[in-house]
Amino acid sequence: MESVKRDIIGKLQEQILSLQGVKPVGDGPAVNFGLGEISASFPGKVFPLAAIHEFLSTNLEDAAASGGFISALLSSLMQKGGLCLWISTQRKIFPPSLITFGLSPERIIFIDLQNERDVLWASEEALKCESLAAVVTELDEISFAQSRRLQLVIEKSRVTSFIIRKNAEKLSATLAAARWRISALPSEAIDGLPGLGFPRWNIELLKVKNGLPGSWTIEYSGGSFRAPSKTVSETIEIRKAV
């Protein structure tokens, strides 16, 4: 009886999401990003692809943390091929550092433009290319109308958009499926050795369409996300699918 109830509830949830305008992730299998309990916040516990993800930052540290978190997501998203375009006016990311997140720098095409108007235009054109895995856009402001233009393109190409808002003191309404804030946290020493440890972030999912916002602390090492605990030996690893 319990399995029958779960099946009925699952089908009802799918119907409700469909009526609310939530489209399926795609014809292929869902990508396992290894986000653990964060995944429970997404509709159907599936990371929204073919959608806009907006990352808010008010300083360079948070913008860099957002870039690191996105890079970790891209390493999973691009496992089965495809390229990514990274478009900005002032590139801050150091391409060789992408290896830390399991990314080959040659699979990321960096486009540096003069102004944000050109960045938005280039992003819209890039999102029309169905062979791309994702497009990362760095800018200060984006309006509702501009985000709508991007979303209309995404619905045809099914390419995922990551937008880093570098100076997001003033919020504006957008059609982003998820709105994030990523903050850098002090790393933990590795086996007592001096120097920097693995990247550690405070992850805030401020808004997610048909999902549940939340806040988590996670670390990234060895190609996987993990929830840090008081001691390294007690850390629970959340491994990504191969």
Image: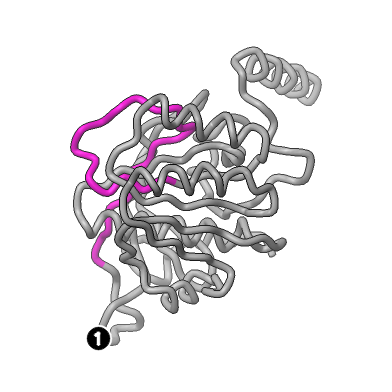
Quarter of the image that includes the N terminus:
top right
Which residue is more in the foreground, 215 or 63? 63
Q: Is residue 85 above or below residue 204?
A: below
Q: Is residue 131 above or below residue 233?
A: above
Please report the residue visible at 47 percent of the width from the left and 61 percent of the height from the top: 71
Neighbourhood count class around disc 1 (C-alpha, 10 Å): few under 14, some 14–19, many 20 upward: few
**Residue 242 x/y as whole percent:** 69, 65
The magenta segment is 163-186
Please report the residue visible at 39 percent of the width from the left and 36 percent of the height from the top: 179
**Residue 145 x/y as whole percent:** 41, 25
Q: Secondary structure at mark 1?
A: loop
Q: Which residue is mark 1?
A: 194
Colouring style: one colour
Residue farthest bottom in this picture: 193
Q: Is residue 106 left or right of residue 215?
A: right
Q: Is residue 17 left or right of residue 10?
A: left
Which residue is more in the foreground, 164 or 36? 164
Identify the amino acid type marked 1. Pro
Quadrant of the rendered image containing residue 147: top left
Q: Is residue 194 above or below residue 187?
A: below
Q: Is residue 133 above or below residue 143?
A: below
**Residue 114 x/y as whole percent:** 32, 56
**Residue 22 x/y as whole percent:** 62, 24
Please report the residue visible at 51 percent of the width from the left and 44 percent of the height from the top: 161
Please report the residue visible at 48 percent of the width from the left and 48 percent of the height from the top: 122
Q: Is residue 226 left or right of residue 158?
A: left
- Residue 173 within the magenta-colored segment of the rendering: yes
Which residue is more in the foreground, 12 or 192? 12
How many numbered circles does the render carry? 1
